[in-house]
């Protein structure tokens, strides 16, 4: 996998430090151990694959993202929080990702490493179900008794299952790429290239900041996904002999594969790599979340016995 930027965790550390040196507004916490919540999320989704990318070789994770390709993402979730320290969250997320080499137009070949001339592109919908744990280190660092700070950073990680279906444009139509075996997946001539599944597992991880109100809370959250595939964009290895499409695919599919497997501006992609097998793909999301507090402990659904809001300084 590519190196991950430490920027997110640095942001969380700065947020924690800010709470220790400045006045903070508090709210009274429920005495029950368990807090139940449900909510929605809205935001954007982007990806890091072999396509598009930075103007040069990259070098760090966030630099490889073409943020202008960000697609809408939305989700719903339910969560239980134990003593405001740890929580477990089940979430369903729907979004989309895309990338295209033409975004590098005007960049010299030596700076874009031939990716503009390669001229590949894709888009895919994403459907994901994840089970994640949340951890609020601030609560362990300081004893808040019956009061909690309104602003609390957290880190989160877990396990997910997602589906995708990379497609490329051809004559005004978006054609699914996996059935075309563009890199010889499933061909006897390439026994090491297996047909990839369109439903796979991932490892989501990240963090965010949570702001508390009496009946609900708001969050800003960043989640990255480590994938176990390099085929989110249908690109991983090198070009194959196009005559193999006629041998293994039916006629109409073979015709599409011949066009879509190599769209470079140079003859047969002879001087341009198709993909980089060293790094798996990934996708990420940045969301704003609204969560409603359903109740706590044995008082499930809205607990009308909660006390009011107070202010307190260090």
Image (cartoon, rainbow, N blue to C red):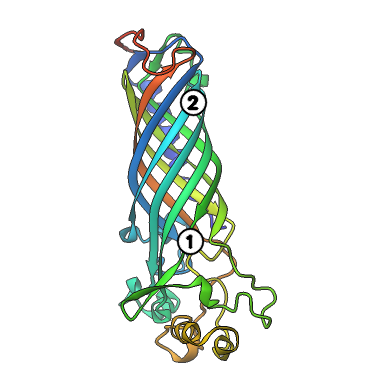
Near-viewer residue (272 or 227): 227
Q: Quadrant for the C terminus, please.
A: top left
Task: Classify 88 as above or below 33.
Answer: below
Task: Classify 122 as above or below 3.
Answer: below
Measure the alpha-carbon separation of dots 2 and 1.
Answer: 39 Å
Location of residue 42 (image quadrant) = top left
Q: Position of residue 173 (x, y in %)?
A: 34, 75
Disc 1: which residue = 59
Residue 243 falls left or right of residue 44: right
Q: Position of residue 10 (x, y in %)?
A: 45, 39
Near-viewer residue (1 or 31): 31
Disc 2: which residue = 80
Residue at point 33% right, 61% down?
69
- Disc nearest the viewer among 2 and 1: 2
Residue 167 falls left or right of residue 312: right
Which one is earlier in the sequence, the residue at label 2 or at label 1? Answer: 1
SS for dot 1 = loop
Q: Position of residue 233 (x, y in %)?
A: 47, 67
Residue at point 35% right, 73% down?
104
Which disc is residue 187 wearing? Answer: none
């Amino acid at each position: 996998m590519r190196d991950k930027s430490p920027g997110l965790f640095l942001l969380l550390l700065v947020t924690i430090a800010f709470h220790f040196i400045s006045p903070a507004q508090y709210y009274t916490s429920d005495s029950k151990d368990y807090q139940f919540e449900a909510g929605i999320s809205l935001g954007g989704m982007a990806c890091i694959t072999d396509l598009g990318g930075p103007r040069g070789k990259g070098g760090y994770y966030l630099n490889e993202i073409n943020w202008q390709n960000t697609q809408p993402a939305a989700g719903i979730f339910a969560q239980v929080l134990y003593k405001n320290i740890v929580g477990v969250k089940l979430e369903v997320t729907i979004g989309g990702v895309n990338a295209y080499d033409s975004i590098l137009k005007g960049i010299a070949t030596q700076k874009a490493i031939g990716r503009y001339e390669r001229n590949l592109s894709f888009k895919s919908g994403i459907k994901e179900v994840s089970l994640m744990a949340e951890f609020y280190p601030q609560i362990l660092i300081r004893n808040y008794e019956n009061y909690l700070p309104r602003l609390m950073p957290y880190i989160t990680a877990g396990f997910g299952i997602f589906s995708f279906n990379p497609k490329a444009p051809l004559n005004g139509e978006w054609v699914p790429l996996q059935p075309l075996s563009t890199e010889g997946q499933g061909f006897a001539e390439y026994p090491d290239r297996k047909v990839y599944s369109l439903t796979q597992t991932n490892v989501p991880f990240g963090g965010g900041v949570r702001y508390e109100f009496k009946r609900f809370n708001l969050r800003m959250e960043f989640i990255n996904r480590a994938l176990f595939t390099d085929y989110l964009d249908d690109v991983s290895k090198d070009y194959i002999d196009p005559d193999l499409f006629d041998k293994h695919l039916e006629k109409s599919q073979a015709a599409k594969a011949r066009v879509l497997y190599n769209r470079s501006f140079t003859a047969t992609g002879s001087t341009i790599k198709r993909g980089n097998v060293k790094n798996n793909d990934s996708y990420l999301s940045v969301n704003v979340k609204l969560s409603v507090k359903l109740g706590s402990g044995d008082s499930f659904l809205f607990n009308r016995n909660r006390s009011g809001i107070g202010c307190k300084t260090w």
